[in-house]
Amino acid sequence: MSHTKTRAGQKNILRLKYTKIDLGMQGSCQSSSLIGRVRPLFRSLEFSPVYARQCLYRGRIFLYCTPCYMSIRFTDFLVELVEIEMDVQLFARELERQHSVVRAEIAPTRHFSPDILHRTLNNILNDVDQRLVAVTMAGTSFEGETIRLIRIGKSNLSVLLWSQMHGDESTATMAIVDILRYLTMRKDDPPVRAILSSLTLHFLPMLNPDGAARCQRRTAQGIDMNRDALALQTPEARILKNLQQTLKPTFGFNLHDQELSTVGTSKELAAIALLAPAFDPLKSENDVRTRAKHLASVFAEIMKERVPGKIARYDDSFEPRAFGDNMQQWGTSTLLVESGHAMNDPQKESIRRLNFVGILSSLYAIATGAYQSFDISSYERLPFNTKKAYDVIIRNVKADYGRGRLTEVDLGVSYQIDTHSEMPPRLVDLGDLSTFVGLKEIDASGKTVPASVLFLGNAFDWEKYFS
Ligand SMILES: [Zn+2]
């Protein structure tokens, strides 16, 4: 199959023209994500242009008309396929379907060592053409651990994506592994071709390997790297700043996990929080930040279809020592993506999938220029994160204060230190928690506990009383 690629006059339309499709060729389904307008050259067949799904299967081309899934088999004539650029939302839906296929096995839990990550990436990238992907050493951590940089794509427009600058925040790291697997497995799919020919992507999947090895937020020096963008006292922060200065990325993705949060005044857990960081205390606007807001709007719109009401805006106060704010100041339009939480999903698999779909859709929107048409109000109208959630809420407990004094209270229990779970759980709140939501909720109506076991801030073995 040969194809020529031309920019159509119409904005943001990429056209791929297929000619002389060799119908004898063998192959499995290679273009399942290709959706386009199909016009057979065989004139005796009346076939009006349809939006169709093309599938190469066992040497035959099948065209599935998407509204009815009626298939038309082409066996002995040439077809010209004019692909109309896939809409960003349509691509996101395709990604959602593809995720279970490309999802990589990393580890049983979301806390894994740098070694495990490196082994997984090696398995994925070893057989890939080195002209497509380059794995280099960005530098070493304080304790001498290699920090890897993975480059894919060929264009002057650079995008830098960094994850796990906080060692216990690995959700986007897992998504990056899936993204790299997808980009290399599907490199011939038109949307992936559009991404890789229009952008050069630089991934730093694990910027704080020492922290990751200890499952802690801070670096081996005990420093919060995201407050070290000015002082640059950690080697990890120096690596990130140096990459910004040398690669001069137009866009940056600053990937984190956030504390258990809710969305605005609702009792919905925030699945994703977004921020186009401010570059000064006045939260001024310039081209760099506006571009980041457009990108945030793409991400928000993609999320709205998947987790409506569960998308928040991250606190937008200026933090002069943080990387997102400084990246914006240094000229890289930066989007902060905070992975949040979902019910019954302690390993954050659903949030990992949201990152996969959101990041790839955003990259596609950058590659095609479509991001510019997303109204920044989609981002600006997002409610802010609120802290109205606990890991466990035990409701309607009778606390016995002795001498017949019984008080009905709700109990809030937390398992979280920074963004990871730790034992033992602690009692963190007591009283009317009707405006709060629990990752796990227990109704303890009719149960009484001695108030002497209810010490705020202390370890609390709640299962002993309310299992
Ligand atoms: Zn973080």
Image (cartoon, helix red, strand yellow):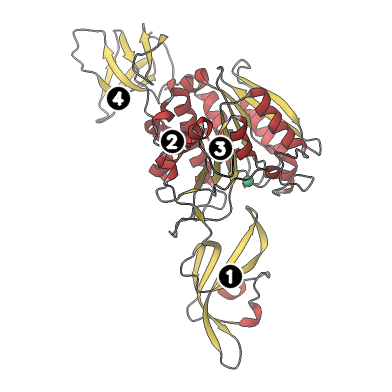
Query: Which element is circle 3 on?
Result: helix
Which residue, given by chain and number where applicable, does mark 4 sit on? 64
**Image location (x, y in percent) of residue 341:** 52, 52
For residue 298, the mark is 2
- State the image coordinates of residue 180 (x, y, percent, origin top left): 57, 29
* Rendered-image quadrant of the N terminus: top left
Label 1 element class: strand
Front position among marks 4 and 2: 2
Instruction: Name the mark nearer the viewer: 1 or 4.
Output: 1
Q: In the rendered image, which residue does mark 1 sit on?
A: 429
Residue farthest along the bottom direction in this orientation? 403
Q: In whole angstroms, how far apart are the C-alphas of marks 1 and 2?
A: 37 Å
Query: Which residue was labeled with disc 3?
Result: 175
Quarter placement of the C terminus:
bottom right
Image position of 12 with respect to 88: above or below: above
Q: Nearer the viewer, residue 378 or 63?
A: 378
Residue nearer the viewer, 349 or 289: 289
Residue 11: give its label: none
- Pointer 2 residue Cβ closer than 8 Å to ligand 1: no
